[in-house]
């Protein structure tokens, strides 16, 4: 059975082939499943951002954090983000975090 952790990413721009232009900077996290042998894959993606409130909140400049899960069925964006995270420099960062998570498990540290 795989273990999981959330890997934060920021300022990723991906090309959306169906539209022919890149996205604005994207921020969020990937849910990464990994096994004791070091194998891993990206199981899910969530984008984070801020949305202006309404009424009085809007006038005060208060923003509310929003999270939007990107379903694999939205092929273009989901797979473009996965492809980006599986290439340099993100791949090395992900593999380092998988290694760190495996070390924590080996000494019994759970979060």
Image: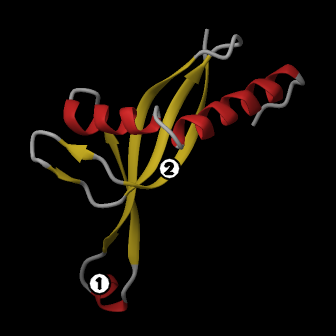
Depth order, front residue of 103/2: 103
Q: Position of residue 71 (x, y in %)?
A: 28, 32
Q: How is the image coloured?
A: secondary structure
Residue furthest to the bottom = 59
Q: Using residue 70 as the reference point, say whether residue 28 is left or right of it.
A: right
* Residue 30 in view of the camera: yes
The answer to whether 21 is drawn above or below residue 90 in the figure is below
Q: Position of residue 22 (x, y in %)?
A: 23, 53
Q: Using residue 100 as the reference point, say whether residue 45 is left or right of it.
A: left
Q: Quadrant of residue 110?
A: top right
Kindly state the secondary structure of the residue where label 2 is placed. strand
Q: Position of residue 91 (x, y in %)?
A: 54, 35
The image's mark for residue 58 is: 1
Question: Circles 2 and 1: CB distance less than 8 Å?
Answer: no
Depth order, front residue of 31/25: 25
Which residue is located at x 85 percent, y 20 percent? 106
The answer to whether 4 is drawn above or below residue 93 in the figure is above
Residue furthest to the left = 19
Which residue is located at x 40 percent, y 43 percent? 46
> Foreground mark, 2 or 1?
2
Depth order, front residue of 93/43: 93
Q: Position of residue 33 (x, y in %)?
A: 55, 22
Location of the N terminus by quadrant is top right
Kindly state the secondary structure of the residue where label 1 is placed. helix
Q: How dense is the environment of label 1, judged by Cα within 10 Å: few (below 14), some, or many (20 and up)?
A: few
Q: Using residue 58 as the reference point, say whether residue 19 is left or right of it.
A: left
Q: How dense is the environment of label 2, judged by Cα within 10 Å: few (below 14), some, or many (20 and up)?
A: some
Q: Quadrant of residue 62?
A: bottom left
* Residue 74 in view of the camera: no
The image's mark for residue 9 is: 2
N-terminal of the pair, mark 2 or mark 1, is 2
Which residue is located at x 80 percent, y 23 percent? 105
């Amino acid at each position: 059975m795989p273990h999981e952790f959330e890997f934060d990413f920021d300022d990723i721009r991906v090309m959306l082939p169906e539209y022919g232009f890149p996205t604005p900077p994207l921020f969020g996290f990937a849910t990464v499943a990994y096994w004791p042998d070091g194998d891993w894959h990206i199981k899910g993606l969530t984008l984070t951002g801020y949305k202006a409130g309404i009424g009085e909140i809007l006038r005060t400049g208060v923003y509310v954090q929003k999270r939007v899960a990107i379903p694999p069925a939205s092929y273009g964006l989901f797979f473009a983000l996965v492809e980006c995270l599986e290439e340099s420099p993100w791949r090395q960062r992900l593999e380092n975090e998988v290694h760190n998570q495996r070390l924590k498990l080996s000494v019994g540290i759970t979060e």
